[in-house]
Amino acid sequence: MANETTGQEGVPQRPAQSGPARMMSERMTIYYSNCAMAATSPRDVSIFFGRYVPAKDQSGGQTLVELYEQQVYMTVQQAEDLAALLSRTVEAIKSAKKA
């Protein structure tokens, strides 16, 4: 039986969050990215996500190129929040590996 701290399957539940509720779109797609770059304006940050793909160079040999396919715009404040979230997440992963 579920209680306040565990879900139906005994998985710990997150504490209630402040702000708007979160939902995941049924149309959301998954995109794997192994390269990224950013462009900025005084008001916005744009992050381009891409992946390395094989291509032929000018002499016909194989090479890797960065193919950018996804772009996300956000305000500077949202970019700061994202940077903090990513930093905390990476630190948690590193700490878990050490344990």
Image (tube, rainbow, N blue to C red):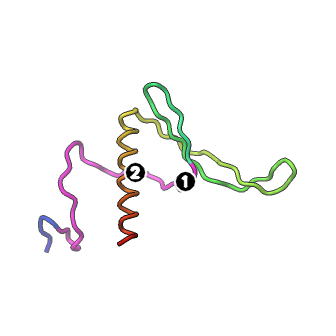
Looking at marks 2 and 1 on the same chain, the residue that comes earlier in the sequence is marked by: 1
- Say what secondary structure mark 1 lies in: loop
Place of residue 42 in the rendered image (x, y in percent of width and height, measured from the top left): 45, 25
Q: Looking at the picture, tell me which residue is in the foreground, 96 or 73.
A: 96
In the depicted structure, whether residue 32 falls above or below residue 71: below
Q: Tell me the quarter of the image containing the N terminus.
A: bottom left
Q: Does 14 sit left or right of 88 as displayed?
A: left
Q: Residue at x 49, y 27 (%)?
A: 41
Q: Residue at x 20, y 68 (%)?
A: 7
| Residue type beneath disc 1 | Ser
| Furthest-right residue in this view | 59
- Residue under pointer 1: 33
Q: Looking at the picture, tell me which residue is in the foreground, 73 or 77.
A: 77
Place of residue 96 in the rendered image (x, y in percent of width and height, measured from the top left): 36, 68
In the depicted structure, whether residue 45 falls above or below residue 96: above
Specify the label residue 86 is tagged with. 2
Mark 2 or mark 1: which is in front? 2
| Residue type beneath disc 2 | Leu
| Furthest-top residue in this view | 42
In the depicted structure, whether residue 80 falls above or below residue 90: above
Mark 1 crowdedness (10 Å alpha carbons): few <14, some 14-19, many ≥20: some
Q: Which residues are magenta?
A: 6-35
Q: Residue at x 54, y 42 (%)?
A: 48
- Say what secondary structure mark 2 lies in: helix
Q: How many marks?
A: 2
The stretch drawn in magenta includes residue 70: no
Place of residue 27 in the rendered image (x, y in percent of width and height, measured from the top left): 43, 51
